Image (spheres, rainbow, N blue to C red):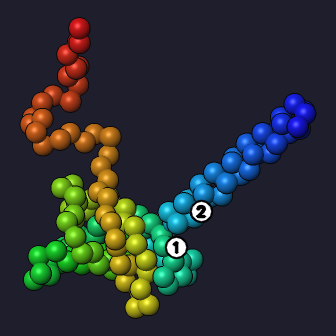
């Protein structure tokens, strides 16, 4: 086989490899893709039952209810304009609390309840871990050597 044909075959194999990797990456992303929705978008019908999505908003005041199994919680997510009941079975993050931000991955059930598979608690830029205590907020980090 001539050198020109060998380079052509090698280029075709490389092209096929890149195309195969692209198809695998697209397939993996499709499985993980989820639209970000707010409670008002769910109220307005922009989310369909069973569609994987992320629900973002605040945990409504006095809405967290823990079930007797110790793992299941029910609460209401709100954006100030609409509210969505949420059900989650698992351990919630330490920052999860009423009147705090949260993002939940899951699906909308036929009765209008959002069933979360995972909950992430959000904090603002002024957050300081409890372990830091009452340290002044304007204190500079020590210099490293």
Q: Is residue 8 above or below residue 49?
A: above
Crowd around label 1: few <14 · some 14–19 · many ≥20 (10 Å): few
Q: Secondary structure at mark 1?
A: helix
Label 2 packing within 10 angstroms: few (<14), some (14-19), many (20+): few
Left or right? Give the position of 112 relative to 123.
right
The x, y position of residue 88, in whole percent, is: 27, 75
The reply, left or right, for residue 41 in relation to residue 84 is right
118 and 77: which is toward the camera: 118
Q: Residue at x 25, y 62 (%)?
A: 99
Question: Label 2: which residue?
Answer: 27
Q: Which mark is residue 41?
A: 1
Image position of 4 (left or right of 66): right
Query: Along the line of sight, which residue is nearer the eye, 11 or 41?
Result: 11
Looking at the image, residue 56 lies above or below residue 134: below
Q: Residue at x 69, y 46 (%)?
A: 18
Residue 9: image x %, image y %? 82, 42
- As drawn, the residue found furthest toward the bottom would be 111
Whether residue 94 is visible here, answered yes or no, is yes
CA distance for labels 2 and 1: 27 Å
Q: Earlier in the sequence, mark 2 or mark 1?
A: 2
- At x 37%, y 83%, the residue is 113
Q: Quadrant of residue 107?
A: bottom left
Residue nearest the observer in this picture, 45 or 103: 103
Quadrant for the N terminus in the image: top right
SS at mark 2? helix
- Image coords of residue 95 (percent x, y): 21, 55
What's the residue at 56%, 59% (across, down)? 29
């Amino acid at each position: 086989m001539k050198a020109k044909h060998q380079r052509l075959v090698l280029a075709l194999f490389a092209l096929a490899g890149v195309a195969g990797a692209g198809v695998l990456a697209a397939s993996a992303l499709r499985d993980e893709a989820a639209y970000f929705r707010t409670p008002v978008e769910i109220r307005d019908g922009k989310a369909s039952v069973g569609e994987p999505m992320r629900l973002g908003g605040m945990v409504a005041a006095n809405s967290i209810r823990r079930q007797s199994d110790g793992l299941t919680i029910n609460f209401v997510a709100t954006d100030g304009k609409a509210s969505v009941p949420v059900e989650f079975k698992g351990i919630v993050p330490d920052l999860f609390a009423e009147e705090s931000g949260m993002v939940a991955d899951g699906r909308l059930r036929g009765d209008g309840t959002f069933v979360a598979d995972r909950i992430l608690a959000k904090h603002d830029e002024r957050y300081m871990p409890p372990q830091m205590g009452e340290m002044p907020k304007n204190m500079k980090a020590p210099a490293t050597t």
